[in-house]
Image: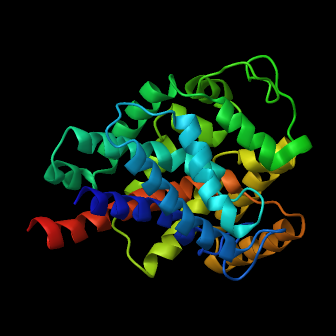
């Protein structure tokens, strides 16, 4: 029974990546269009393998109070990377969903099946459990595994960060939580982890009751709204802060046109989408938040299946 629940949780969380990448959004990979050297099939394959990685980690450490989250992140990321042959598609996503999977896993250690199943549709409780697990276990976890991943993914393209952010090429020990704390000011995904998923919570609140095909429309609209409010740090890191600001302001401009005409809004998004793809301007950090939110939303579907087939 335990393994069955773990499988359901790992698949539900990982599915967020597949669903998010299946919605056509400005500058993002979708079934219709790729971006640079990234294509939709890579996200589908990565989603499948990440679910295996999550299950492997949940099985391996199911009775432990804390595991080395840094090592687990490295392991789960590698599961996804090994099959699609592209550059980073899912590191931010793995960072966000792994504490959720392991937090629920630890919760199950001290509670019965009914208690676990009952919280699967309570996203606020899920995020609280996840953040508590991340903060407690992250202080005991080796952040150098994450630095090693960044080095492997970006190589010489990654700047050497000194001062408040540890040197990526240093062997000096730094905890994962310290890395998150230091990096939160310049990375929206790390800020989500440090601040207990505030943006992700707000997305889940909106999409939790949405069903296909309306779900895909809601995801696209929310993606654009969030992109108009926050700087996408993937663009800032890979391109420049200036281009990240331009992307955000373009989304604001298109939303302002919505007040005049939905047709003008659609034309605006379509126009900028073409430009972004030509220069590989990919808002990956916002996409990670959306994918995580979708995965958490899908946990409520797991609850329904488990409740129907197992408990009642």
Is 31 on the left or on the right of 239, as rendered? left
Residue 104 visible, this orientation: yes
Is 166 on the left or on the right of 297, as rendered? right
Instruction: Identify the residue shown where x is 74% and y is 23%.
Output: 165
Instruction: Identify the residue shown where x is 25% and y is 41%.
Output: 109
Q: Where's residue 230, x and y in %?
A: 65, 45
Instruction: Identify the residue shown where x is 66% and y is 36%.
Output: 145
Quadrant of the image containing the N terminus: bottom left
Q: Nearer the viewer, residue 284 or 302?
A: 302
Q: Is residue 234 above or below residue 310?
A: above
Residue 256 visible, this orientation: no
Instruction: Identify the residue shown where x is 82% and y is 29%.
Output: 169
Q: Is residue 103 above or below residue 306?
A: above
Q: Where's residue 220, x and y in %?
A: 57, 69
Q: Quadrant of residue 17?
A: bottom right
Is 10 on the left or on the right of 301, as rendered? right
Quadrant of the image containing the C terminus: bottom left
Q: Nearer the viewer, residue 58 or 131?
A: 58
């Amino acid at each position: 029974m335990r393994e069955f629940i773990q499988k359901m949780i790992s698949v539900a969380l990982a599915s967020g990546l597949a669903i998010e990448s299946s919605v056509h959004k400005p500058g993002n990979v979708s079934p219709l269009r790729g971006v640079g050297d990234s294509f939709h099939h890579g996200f589908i394959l990565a989603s499948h393998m990440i679910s295996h990685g999550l299950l492997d980690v949940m099985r391996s450490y199911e009775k432990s109070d804390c595991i080395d989250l840094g090592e687990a992140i490295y392991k789960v990321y590698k599961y996804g990377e090994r099959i699609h042959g592209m550059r980073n598609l899912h590191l931010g996503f793995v960072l966000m969903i792994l504490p959720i999977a392991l937090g629920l896993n630890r919760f199950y250690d001290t509670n019965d099946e009914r208690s676990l199943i009952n919280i699967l549709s309570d996203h606020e409780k899920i995020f609280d459990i996840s953040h508590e697990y991340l903060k407690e276990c992250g202080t005991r976890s080796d952040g150098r595994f994450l630095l090693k991943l960044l080095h492997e993914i970006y190589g010489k393209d990654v700047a050497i960060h000194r001062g408040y952010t540890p040197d990526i090429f240093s062997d000096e020990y730094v905890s994962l939580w310290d890395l998150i704390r230091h990096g939160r000011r310049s990375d929206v995904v790390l800020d989500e982890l440090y601040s207990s998923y505030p943006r992700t919570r707000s997305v889940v609140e909106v999409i939790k009751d949405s069903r296909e095909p309306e779900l895909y429309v809601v995801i696209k609209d929310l993606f654009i709204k969030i992109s108009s409010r926050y700087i996408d740090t993937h663009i800032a890191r890979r391109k420049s802060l200036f281009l990240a600001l331009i992307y955000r302001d373009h989304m604001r401009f298109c939303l302002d046109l919505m007040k005049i005409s939905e047709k003008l809004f659609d034309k605006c998004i379509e126009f900028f989408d073409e430009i972004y793809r030509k220069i590989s301007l990919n808002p990956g950090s916002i996409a990670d938040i959306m994918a995580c939110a979708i995965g958490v939303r899908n946990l409520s579907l797991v609850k329904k299946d488990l409740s129907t087939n197992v408990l009642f």
